[in-house]
Amino acid sequence: MRKGLGGAILAFFLLSLGGLLLHVRIHLLSDTGAIKLGLNGIVPVVFGIVNTFVLPLMFLSRKTASWAFLITVLTVIAGTAGMAYFSATDPRLALTANGIILHTTLPDILVLWSKVGLGYAILRLVRRG
């Protein structure tokens, strides 16, 4: 294994695990404890499971690392679209700098986009082999 690859994949796993746990808390369970199905319920959790448990393993192989990066980018774009839509449709949103920075999903989206850079760095390490 290339020097630094294990640490980068571990960072990707931990970042994804943090996102998965947040999504389970926010999206999967309703106030009554029932599982929410549908686009806002199970889909973010499924994406989180794939990013946490499947993609780190795919990054370990030269044959599948490019696919892992592509899936990473696609899930980041889908997550960005979903979170931006959620914030944009919130009637309580105040269109001020404070409202946009602190009361939307903008911070979550910025953290999510860090996975693209990290995934690209992993891909580069894997390709150098």
Image (tube, rainbow, N blue to C red):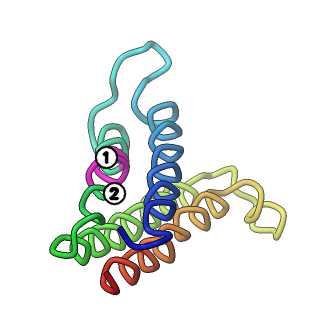
Is residue 68 highlighted in magenta? no
Establish if 26 lies above or below 8.
above
Quarter of the figure with residue 126: bottom left
Residue 95 place in picture, x, y as percent: 75, 67
Whole-number angstrom distance, CA of label 2 to CA of label 1: 6 Å
Numbered badge on residue 56: 2
Establish if 117 lies above or below 26.
below
| Front residue of this view, candidates 28 and 89 | 28
Residue 94 place in picture, x, y as percent: 76, 60
Establish if 120 lies above or below 39.
below
Q: Amino acid at mark 1?
A: Phe
Q: Amino acid at mark 2?
A: Pro
Other residues around mark 1 within 10 Å, as few (<14) / some (14–19) / many (≥20): few
Instruction: Assign a secondary structure to mark 2.
Output: helix
Decide: marks 2, 1 in contact (CB < 8 A)?
Answer: yes
| Front residue of this view, candidates 47 and 43 | 47
Q: Which residues are magenta?
A: 48-54
Other residues around mark 2 within 10 Å, as few (<14) / some (14–19) / many (≥20): many
Give the side of residue 34 with respect to residue 12, left or right: left
Is residue 49 highlighted in magenta? yes
Residue 53 place in picture, x, y as percent: 31, 46
- For the stretch drawn in magenta, the main secondary structure is helix
Residue 106 place in picture, x, y as percent: 64, 64
Residue in view at x 41 percent, y 67 percent: 76
Residue at which label 1 appears: 53
Instruction: Assign a secondary structure to mark 1.
Output: helix
Residue in view at x 25 percent, y 72 percent: 65
Residue in view at x 49 percent, y 36 percent: 21
Figure quadrant of the N terminus = bottom left
Figure quadrant of the C terminus = bottom left
